[in-house]
Image (cartoon, grey):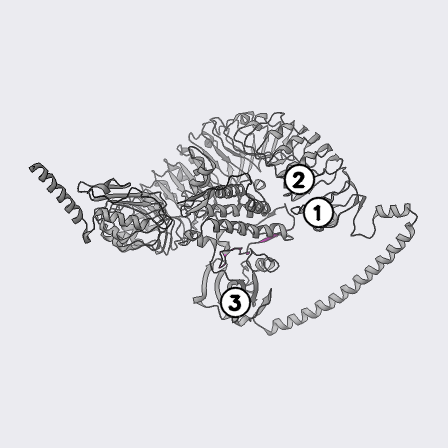
Amino acid sequence: MRSFYNYLLLYISLILLLYSASSNGYSDLEVLLKLKSSMIGRKGSGLDDWEFSSSPSAHCYFSGVKCDEDFRVVALNVSFSPLFGTISPEIGLLNKLVNLTISTVNLTGKIPVEMRDLTSLKIFNISNNVFRGSFPGEVLTGMTQLEILDAYNNNFTGLLPIEVANLKILKHLSFGGNFFTGEIPEKYSDIQSLEYLGLNGIGLTGKSPAFLARLKNLKNLLIGYFNAYDGGIPPEFGSLSQLELLDMASCNLTGEIPASLSNLKHLHSLFLQENRLTGRIPSQLSGLISLKSLDLSLNELTGEIPESFSALQNITLINLFKNNLYGSIPSFVGDFPHLEVLQVWGNNFTRELPENLGLNGKLYKLDVTSNHLTGLIPRDLCKGGRLETLILMENFFFGPLPEELGKCKSLTKIRIMNNFLVGAIPAGIFNLPLLSIIELGNNLFSGELPSQMSSASLGQLRVSNNRITGKIPPAIGNLRTLQILSLEMNKFWGEIPEEIFNIKLLSKINISDNNITGEIPPSISQCTSLTSIDFSQNSLTGEIPKGIDKLKDLSILNFSRNQLTGLIPAEIRYMTSLTILDLSDNNFDGRIPTDGQFLVFNDSSFTGNPNLCSPRHVTCPALINQARGSGHGQGASFTASKLSKLIITIITFITALLLIIVTVYRMRKKRLQKSQAWKLTAFQRLDFKAEDVLECLKEENIIGKGGAGTVYRGSMPDGLEVAIKKLVGRGTGRSDHGFSAEIQTLGRIRHRNIVRLLGYVSNKDTNLLLYEYMPNGSLGEMLHGSKGAHLQWERRYRIAVEAAKGLCYLHHDCSPLIIHRDVKSNNILLDEDYEAHVADFGLAKFLQDAGASECMSSIAGSYGYIAPEYAYTLKIDEKSDVYSFGVVLLELIAGRKPVGEFGDGVDIIRWVRKTTSELPQPSDPALVLAIMDPRLSEYPLAGVIHLFKVAMMCVEDESSARPTMREVVHMLTNPPQSAPRPSILTF
């Protein structure tokens, strides 16, 4: 009995101890239950086992909770759950906490100041949430034991907290991926214990922080991306003898790379890409004996690769692309035992590739595009069976393509166009299981294509402008994933194999400029995915197949310069997607249909058909011959002659009248301009004056600032809300910052999903553009800001469709077509109903010919959105916009910025590809769920998968593999009918 009472007293004392352990009468159990109540938001879930119990130690068995011997909570680790709530002030009562890790659970709100009572805390990790407001530095004052402070990827604003400098044993500090402003506090250099400092992707300014060189124990320094420092790389950083990672990518660095960095003997990664660094690569960097990853790409470096770099025997990645480097690629590069990635495109390198390149068996990515390299292609590039990407285009390589590449089963891309390669293409290449792109155009290949083809992944086959002969193999029909077939400008003969049109995904086929004979296979009408057909410059006969109008998505149809006969099918009038039709130089007869889509085409589409009659011309050879045959030829000729003279007289009179009107108008306009300093030019009826606009240019009305100018919000006397963009005018002698492009585009186009330019106010020095006001700002600000959770799936998908429609209008309904050149989430504005409007046409370009490209003098656009071919060649076409739009779609799905959140120079596309490639059991749902924005609480899984697939099509590296914006709109508004009813996932 006495034993029973002893146990009872012990039990009671434990309960009393538990309840007295926390102040204010709360036990740790009660605190945890209050935390659960606040952390699980309205649409959140998780912490299911956190339930009340009378047991004094029950809470110690909660998931993510650890206790000491007194049942006090010492560790709280809650991560990767969709909580969507806030942290309650009661958390300060867990004053024995040593480890507080609440990561990737979508918590929002502000950090409670009561956390200052967590004086035992050593680990404080709140990364990958949506906390907002300034980071309360006062909570750190009592955390004298703190070793890890990780607030990466939240929405904190304001200045960096200075109180961090008082944490004398702090080892890890990460504030990256937030929205802080100002400079890095110099006091941070007092944290002598610091080993990891991450201030990347924030938006900091000021001088390059040389004072950080005082942090002698630093191992990882990440201060790049979206930061913009004045000056270059501090030479003082060479004294950071323990440094292992230095990342200063994309932070406006200038000047030369300091040779003092060679002192960093433990450095394994040096990332300095996307800056404005000049001068030569210091030969002293060969002293970086531990270096594995070197990225100096996208700078203005010159000179040669130093011979001393042969000492870098641990190197695995070399990125030197887009600089002004020259000389040869040293032979020792081929001898590096661990080299995996070599990307040096966009330089001026000469001579041969190292003969031993790939012999180490580890090479998996090689890109030397746009240099002056020559010689033979090394035979051992795929020695270890790991080579995935082989890009050698736009050089002077000669000789055959190594047969060994036909056995390289790891290959996913071969791009070797624009060289001088000869011989037959290795047959094995067409059977590689993972290969998605074969681009061998503009070489001197000969022989025939193989009769056996079985590649299961091939999406593009391009061998144009070679000397390939023989028949087009019917085996091409076995390439079930093929989307683009480009065989033009070769010496193919025989007929078109009908098996080709059994490929359900085929969107573009070009076999022009060959010796193809016979009729066009009727099965072509069954290949409904086709968007472009070019069979021109062959010897095709017969008629255009019936059912051609079934190709609803076809935008280009070119049958010119053949020997086709018969009538032009009238049903083409129903092909509303068809924007380019060329039937010239054939033997068609009869009349050209006049209604429907035929109204889009001009006379040049039908020239060179002597028996074809156009209703737009009075004279028609076929009709005249017919009239002469019936005895009325002379009368018809006389009538035509009189009518021609009458038309000439009328045209002359109208032209003279127009000249008089224009002259009078210009004289009046000049007088008006002289009499007024400011002038309002309206593109629609406006009930206000220039003076009303000028009244709104006040500091308190500023709603945004950018490189091109300042944006004000203005209220006009009639109640109209406008956005006023103030630009620098031409009168100053500087660039007009997009003024001309804006008024030339927005001033002449009208579409529901393109921001409306109401007019502009200007004088000789300044231009003010007037737009309809968008109350909800930009998609980028909304999506990546504190209100991102407001954009749930239905709204995001609708925004994607609306923005796509706006871009589709620019590309397909404007003549000439308009390329935006700066498509990004910040240039998609949202009205009061969250309807999307494409905005900011300051970089827009007109392109006279659809399908053509134009070469720019420099790269324009925004980092993270720029298409690869634009960076390669400075050539743009409408597919450059499609790539940028694909990035926006990935932002909508993942809820992440395009760059700055993934570390080590990785953008959102590379992150998505890497994340999905590492899945142990890949499937469509698994792919999407791996990257899904955790703030989304409810969404149709099938719909997300569909949008993800469209996005990945848009961001294909090869521009021709991307869909047109018309195709994008069609896919977004017509999801696959075969898909099962979408399941709704709710969190």
Q: Quadrant of the C terminus?
A: top left
Q: Secondary structure at mark 1?
A: helix
Q: Nearer the viewer, residue 196 or 179?
A: 179
Q: Of the residues under marks 2 and 1, which one precedes in the sequence?
A: 2
Q: Which residue is mark 2?
A: 533
Q: Determine the residue located farthest toward the left in the rendered image.
A: 2
Q: Nearer the viewer, residue 64 or 399?
A: 64
The residue furthest front is 1
Q: CA distance from mark 1 to mark 3?
A: 43 Å
Report the mark closest to the observer, 2 or 1.
Answer: 1
For label 3, the SS is: loop
Residue of label 3: 720
**Left or right of 675: which side holds 941?**
left
Q: Amino acid at mark 1?
A: Arg
Position of the N terminus by quadrant: top left
What's drawn in magenta, residue-wise? 830-850
* Closer to viewer: mark 2 or mark 3: 3
Q: Are marks 2 and 1 in contact (CB under 8 Å)?
A: no
Cα separation, mark 2 vs mark 3, equals 49 Å
Secondary structure beneath dot 2 equals strand
Q: Which residue is mark 1?
A: 573
Q: From the viewer's perspective, is 781 left or right of 975?
A: left
Crowd band around label 3 with a 10 angstrom C-alpha radius: few (<14), some (14–19), many (20+): few
